[in-house]
Amino acid sequence: MSSTYAPAGMPLMNCTPSQLEIRSVVGMGRANSTTQTELTAYFRRGHDEEIQHRVSSIAGGSSGVVALIGQPKSGMKRALWEAIRSSKPGMLAPLLDGWWIWPGTSPSDPRSLLARIGELPARTVLWLPNAARYLLDHGPEVGEQVARELRDLVYDARRGPVMVLLTLSQGDIHRLTASSSGAQAALSVHARQLLAGNVISVPDRFTEAEVVTARNSEDPRIVEAAEHSSDGYVIQYLVEAPDFQARFSLAGPVARAILQCLIDARIIGHDPWVRAQLVRAGALGYLPEWERARLGESWFEEAIDQLTACGVGETGMLLVRSGDDSGETATERMFRLNDYLECQFVTEAGRHALPAPHLWSSLFSFAAPGSLIPLGRECRRRGLIREAARFFLLVRNGATSAARRELADMMRGCGRFDEALDLHRAAAGSHVPAAVLAGGQILLEAGRPEAAAEWLGQAIGPGDAESLKLEAIAYVEAGQRQKAVEVYRRLAKGGDVNAAVVAAEMIAEESGYEKGVSFLSVQRSATGLNTLAGIAELVVEHVDEGRAVEWLRDHAQSGDADAYLVGADLLLGLGEIEEALQWCDHAIKLEVAGARIHAARMYARAGLSDTALAHAREAARRGEPQALAEVAKVHVERGLRRRAMECYADAASCGHDESWVSAAEQAAVLAEMSTAADYYRRARRAGSPQAAARIAVALCRSGPPETVHEALRWYVGVVESAGPDSVLPVAQFLRGDAATVAIEAYSARHGADLGTAMKWLAEGFASAARKATAANASLQESVNTAKFLGDVTPREFGGAVYWFEQAACYGYPAARVQAAELLLEFDRTSEALVLLREVQSTGLLRRTDPRLLVALIREKHFDEALAMIESELDVGETALIGDVVSALLRVDRTKDAMRLLSRAVDAGNVSARVILADRQVRQNRCDKALDHYLVAYCRGRADVWEKVERILKGNGDSTTLGELRMYGVTVEGKPSLPWTLEDLAGDLTAVGGDGQDRYRD
């Protein structure tokens, strides 16, 4: 070796984050400061401990691989960087002092890796983020060669220690490890072995507890991300949000028009991927005429290049993929908003909005085929019936039948029965069962039973049983009972015993019960249907029980042994217990199916427990353990808990698994904790949170404090759910030490810290308090007086507030906000305001948080509250208006409330429009309210339709109501003029579609 030899790579301690593709975080509001470090303060999460353990083990001298699996921008590179730059335990010296890293500047490529891997010295970190670049992107042969060389390096003790660090996406890991066969399997064996046992999953989202902790970070950038990220995507916000915000606000008019076109298309139901033709045509409409006149020939391509270019993160404002066409130009591709923009402008802001008026024509012309049905559904939900119908009519090829069904269902819901029927006519003529059934339902709903029966007569196949049943019903409604009987006869021949019984009842009404009995007897002998119970019911209805018993006796003695069981049930109902038991005995001797179960239950009811148990055990021996459970049920009814428990346990031991739960419940009533727990453990799949709760409650009610504590530990330990609803069943027992027991059990069961466990208990108490309050209100309403119980604050309320405060002291500061919310909910406003001000002083609460504003208004700090609200409205923020206006109206500040509502309505806030309309209804200004409701309806507030109906019914305006139901509303929120599907189909044909032919099919 030459004396001038230099190892591959560079000293690890000389490496900077940017050399390893770890991006700095800049441009985030208050965090945009020249004093900030390149990286944010690191926030340790659950997976960091395992990463650190693996890295420390390798640093100790044993070569190894650490592969992190997660979504892009989930913090995998940063987690690895923190681990390799950590200190030795209890010391300031770096853990990997003296180590090298390759490549010194990432990324490299697989050929460079293969060329240099033989030169890597011991104590080298191979930094391979986005390892698909080395293992997948250059083909399977190259990837497998890289994997083999890495394995050789790790396994060669003479060259160690070395540390191989990789990051992969879930898709990458699937491609590398998915089972395959033949040559493909041979090309992935080394990659699989390289990853085996070395994978650590990195969640892409922070947990709720992690988000709250992040809000207390010393780094303002983390605090901002935790406050504003959605669904725990804190890292993604840190990386991308500042860039996306800046790029969106600074976008030029053409780029902004393209983005708004995509946003509007998504709002009305288009799938995320949108055709370039739609984007191009739709975007032009957002530009003023003078701006369109300035556009060059390549305006669209230039704007798309700008929007798809990556910024600080690894994603552009738009994502792009090839569409159905194979060309390379931008007009032949499909685009979608990135996840951040989708969340900000569609998921959150777009629920109560409509597309710009000009975009509809582009949607009709260029919407992706797979989006036509979703677009139609969303329009239907908003009452835009005409637009929905156009989208459904545009569907072609393989989805035509599905679209026709959607359109027919919509027409039926609108009361336009003839048009709905026409859409099923062709398929029904071809005897398609679903079309035959749907058409029959439409005609029956339209009050045309004769036509329905004729239509349903098209059913011919074995899968048409539902249509046949409906045909029979149609004949009955049409008064053609004989034809109905014939249809029921057909169903009976197909094995439908209920149809046979109905036919017999109709025959009995027309020709006497003997004819009905004869019909069922023939069915019994000809088809094997068990019509005996139907015969007995028919005889009882038309004669009496005694005659039914005689008929069954004769029939049983003639060789139909099943009649003994039917007769036994009838005799038991008559109180003839001894004879009923004799009939059961006959059935047992003749080995009638289910006879021993019947006998076990009947003997138990007769008080002959030993005989009942003997029959039940014999039935269990023959594979019917439910017989023991039947005996146990009778014991429960009689209060014989221990006998019931033993019977249930026997049934379970014989294979009736659900009986373990019942046995456990009986053991709980007997205060036998260990027995109850053991039985429930054996229940396996038969166990449920509800059953566990019943057992815990029974134990808590029947035992001393020690048993209560033990029961609570057991209950929290076996219930899978970590949600607060699991507190509800046992909330009444969680007093004093019992609450502490539950918290410790929860912490142990779910591996949670005490603060999280306290929050769980507090949220459970809060739910219990709300439930108790609702029950109190319901009881007061039932006795028609508000003075019956008074304004009772549930005991659980105090427990919830106390434990929220305790959770805040144990590392969950946001719990104080939850406590304040509860105080507001139960009208403890002054306490809530004090608490909210304290929380705000820590930086955990926005200055204009709606909870704080509501508390200020209720405590009559009007000037302060109104100033903050006005400042929000000045910048277009209207989300808090609903809570604020309700609070103002509650304290009789009507003028202020109306002024704020008007501003919010003018700014496009649909919820404010509904609140205003609700108030107008109370003021008997229903015409004004109706206008607002219809606008809200077409903008996505489907819940206001009931209010529209109420107003029109109250005004006696059935004409307008009927027209709204039939024709819907316009995109302006006005009642639509009458139109027909034929008209729409003709319009589509005129513009080159094939809607008319499809409609007429």
Image (cartoon, grey):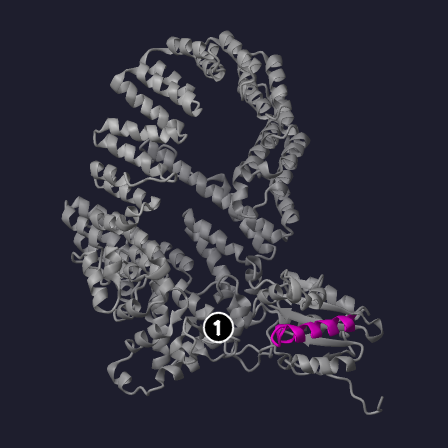
Q: Is residue 856 left or right of residue 315?
A: left
Q: Name the residue nearer the viewer: 143 or 745.
A: 143
Q: Quadrant of residue 281?
A: bottom left
Q: Name the residue nearer the viewer: 329 or 493.
A: 493
Q: Is residue 415 left or right of residue 566?
A: left
Residue at 67%, 69% (x, y): give it: 187
- Crowding near pointer 1: few (<14 within 10 Å), some, many (20+)? many
Q: Magenta stretch mostly in which secondary structure?
A: helix
Q: Which residue is mark 1?
A: 241
Q: Name the residue nearer the viewer: 952 or 962.
A: 962
Residue at 38%, 70% (x, y): give it: 274
Q: Is residue 149 magenta?
A: yes
Residue 244, above or below 568:
below
Estimate the x, y position of residue 840 in percent, counting from the top left. Answer: 48, 63
Q: Quadrant of residue 497?
A: top left
Q: Is residue 412 magenta?
A: no
Which element is circle 1 on?
helix
Estimate the x, y position of residue 354 in percent, counting from the top left. Answer: 30, 64
Quarter of the picture containing the N terminus is bottom right
Quarter of the picture containing the C terminus is bottom left
Numbered disc total: 1
Q: Name the residue nearer the viewer: 111 or 844.
A: 111
Read off the magenta span.
131-154
